[in-house]
Amino acid sequence: MWRRRPSWGCATRRALLAAALAAAVVVLYAAGGSPNGMPASLFFDDDAQADIPASNLTADHLLDGLLTTEFSYRSCRSRYEFAGYHKKSLHKPSPYLLAKLRNQEALQKRCGPGTAAHKKALRQLDSGEGVAHDDADCRYLVYINYRGLGNRMLAIASAFLYAVLTERVLLVDGGKEVADLFCEPFPGTTWLLPRAGWRSPLRRLVGYDGGSKESLGNMLQSGAVVVSADGNASWSSPQPPPYVYLHLAGGYGFHDKLFFCGAHQRLLRGVPWLLMRTDNYIVPGLFLMSPFRGELEAMFPEKDAAFYHLGRYLFHPTNAVWHAVTSYYRSTLAAADRRVGIQIRVFHKKQPPQRVLDQLLSCVRDEKLIPETIAGNDTLSHAIMVTSLSSWYYERIKGEYGGRVAGGVHQPSHEGRQRWEDTAHNMRALSEMYLLSMCDVLVTSGYSTFGYVAQVLAGLRPWVMARPPMWADDWTEGLDPQALPCQRAASIEPCFHSPSAYNCATGRDVDLDKVTPYIRRCVDVSCGIKLVNESSSQW
């Protein structure tokens, strides 16, 4: 006889799923005290039943004001425990940035999902009505879920900064998976895009691409936008459209890149809804735009700390992910005096594994990142953590260094291949990004957004291994035979892989790394650009 299935409420089902996902994520759990070398005051009792009073949270817990005390400690432990697993930063957020964050939080709460303003904006969007700028109570930027987790984190941070600059509410597509990965960043509201009605343009987000007629690039070509002789742009209709799609994904075309023109930013100002698809870290491009440059320079006096502050503010792993991170760290890495993180990502199908390994070992030896002495003879104990989709590299690195480093060689997981939209896979990936960020030295693979996120959260300039161009037919094509096996990144900032070189004012391309002293070319992507500290101080 079939038994009646228990009727579980949403909260119960969610708790059970979280427990199951945690079991899938955790590689090794171990009880332990505070991480080695971390101040005990940054940690609280794991078994405490009550929330930690806000009065017990220090400036270190709050990341020097990036975070507020408005959240429950136990609901998202990573938010206030992050500082305890990372070195104290000398790079403080500016008072202007903190003020902008508080203003954005207030906007998100006033106009976010469930509010009267949001319901009104949805009705207007679903009806297809354009709204005059003066009548728009709240305006929105929707980030469309796209690509792997590293790309998405860089894109969400970019979208958030653009939302702050343009005074828009950020809503993130991705649904339940995003909720399983990250805690809510804004107090008293949600950043998750609610399920849309059947008539809503928000219902078909997956269908938007470079060919969509609603894209800014296509509108600029179709006559929807009129450009005057002096370069000013206006809508050909009496009112702006109810929404515009921004196609900023890699490989986007010339007209899509005109998003980075100041005249078109003024045009977009009156559009109630913007839908953005990107897999890029577009922040360096925002710094090159005249309407935003002054604001950004005030927000980030240290230009190469942009994602450093944005990432620490926005991304807080859920308790399931954070428990996996901290348990593995305490049991495997905490006892070492020096932790070396090695991130290997192979993009080229024809890259011989042995060549990649030889390149890595040459980098490590040339830069003296790992001692060549026998374990026990070195003054500092070292631990090596390898992240890779393959176990092949870990096994050979362990064979090379397993007997030389007292802390051992470790690999949390090896998934075999990347799995987009697989929650358990992405939870493991997120945990490994944060484990890498707890290392003292990083060696990363060029072009890898996974490595970018880890290096910025760590606040470390990594040693970056060169890779062949994506167009190359074999491992050697496109590589400089005299090139070093790895180079030190100019800053901790991620690389913007596909910027626009078009100067909207002059109507011709420019050399982007000569426009301003805080923009340089990336060591791993020849056409890419990144933010650096114009004073050239080192992290």
Image (tube, rainbow, N blue to C red):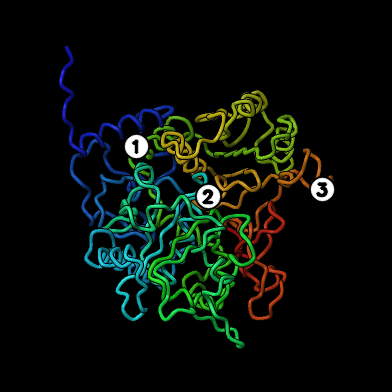
C-alpha separation, residue under disc 2 versus residue under disc 3: 27 Å
Residue at image position (41%, 59%) is: 142
| Rendered position, 354 above or below 287 | above
C-alpha separation, residue under disc 1 versus residue under disc 2: 22 Å
* Residue 423 shows up from this direction: yes
Q: Of marks 3 and 1, which one's residue comes earlier in the chain?
A: 1
Residue under numbered circle 2: 151
Q: Of marks 1 and 2, which one's residue comes earlier in the chain?
A: 2
Label placed on residue 174: none
Query: Quarter holding the N terminus?
Result: top left
Q: Nearer the viewer, mark 2 or mark 3?
A: 2
Is the residue under label 2 in contact with that under label 1 (CB below 8 Å)?
no
| Rendered position, 167 above or below 73 | below
Q: 51 left or right of 141?
A: left
Dot 1 amino acid type: Ala
Dot 2 amino acid type: Asn
Dot 3 amino acid type: Asp
What element does badge 1 sit on? helix
Label placed on residue 480: 3
Residue 320 percent coordinates (x, y): 34, 37
Q: 443 left or right of 135?
A: right
Name the residue nearer the viewer: 335 or 263: 263
Residue at image position (28%, 64%) is: 123
Residue under numbered circle 1: 320
Residue 48 percent coordinates (x, y): 21, 39
| Rendered position, 424 above or below 395 | below
What element does badge 3 sit on? loop
What element does badge 2 sit on? helix
Name the residue nearer the viewer: 227 or 284: 227
Q: Of marks 2 and 3, which one's residue comes earlier in the chain?
A: 2
| Rendered position, 382 above or below 255 | above
